[in-house]
Image (spheres, grey):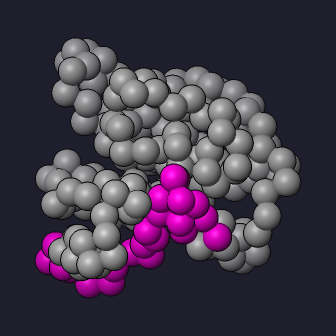
Amino acid sequence: MEITSAEFKISNTRIDKCPQDGLPEYAFIGRSNVGKSSLINMLTRKPKLAMTSSTPGKTLLINHFLINKQWYLVDLPGYGYAKRGKKQQEKIQQIIEDYVLDREALTCLFVLVDSRHEPQKIDLEFIEWLGENGVPFAIIFTKADKLNITQQRENIANYLHKLEEQWEELPPYFLTSAEKQTGRNEVLDYIDSINKSL
């Protein structure tokens, strides 16, 4: 699939204010600083579409981007940023839960995981929560350019092995690098295949 148009539509904190046109939505979520905005910009080939920041925890809203006038790419707040106050953390958690559990247009949730790290408890718990609630999701391993091929394979194998402790069937997964454009076609083709099956 080629992206011919990508435009910012709306930001808000409540799902009843999200677009009501019924188009499928593919949302991106992950821990703060996992490379979400960079990945969105890489997929759309628009370097400034999603605001990137060196400060973690900047995305505090649900951001909708209309792609090819046919589907939405949705940038969700990052979870687990420790420097936020407790109140703000609870608010962010509520925004995420409302969207993920109650947003009917949500077609697939992409959970971003930093490929450089060991499996993190917060990510594993989030993935388990998605499973318990029957939310369709896929995993995107980010920052692949920071590892050599052997490390990439090893880290992903470790991660999948950890998931197998809980999951009979593993979710789809992709390895990406915003720097090197790795995984772009695979992620977009996956979205395209879902769109065609709707």
Q: Quadrant of residue 26?
A: bottom right
Name the one closer to the observer, 171 or 49.
Answer: 49
Quadrant housing the N terminus: bottom right
Question: Magenta stretch containing residue 19, yes or no?
Answer: no
> 24 above or below 188?
above
Please give the name of the residue rendered at 43% of the width and 34% of the height, measured from the top-left corner: 77
Give me the residue at 66% from left, 33% from top.
48
Any part of residue 111 in sight: yes
- Snapshot quadrant of residue 165: bottom left
| Towards the viewer: 133 or 72 | 72
Left or right of 26: which side holds 19?
right
Q: Quadrant of residue 141?
A: bottom left
Q: Which residues are magenta?
A: 160-185
Please report the residue visible at 25 percent of the width from the left and 53 percent of the height from the top: 123
Left or right, residue 119 beside residue 34: left
Image position of 184 (left or right of 117): right
Is 178 drawn above or below residue 148 in the view shown?
above
The kind of secondary structure the magenta stretch mainly shows is loop
Percent coordinates x, y for residue 114 in the rendering = 31, 54
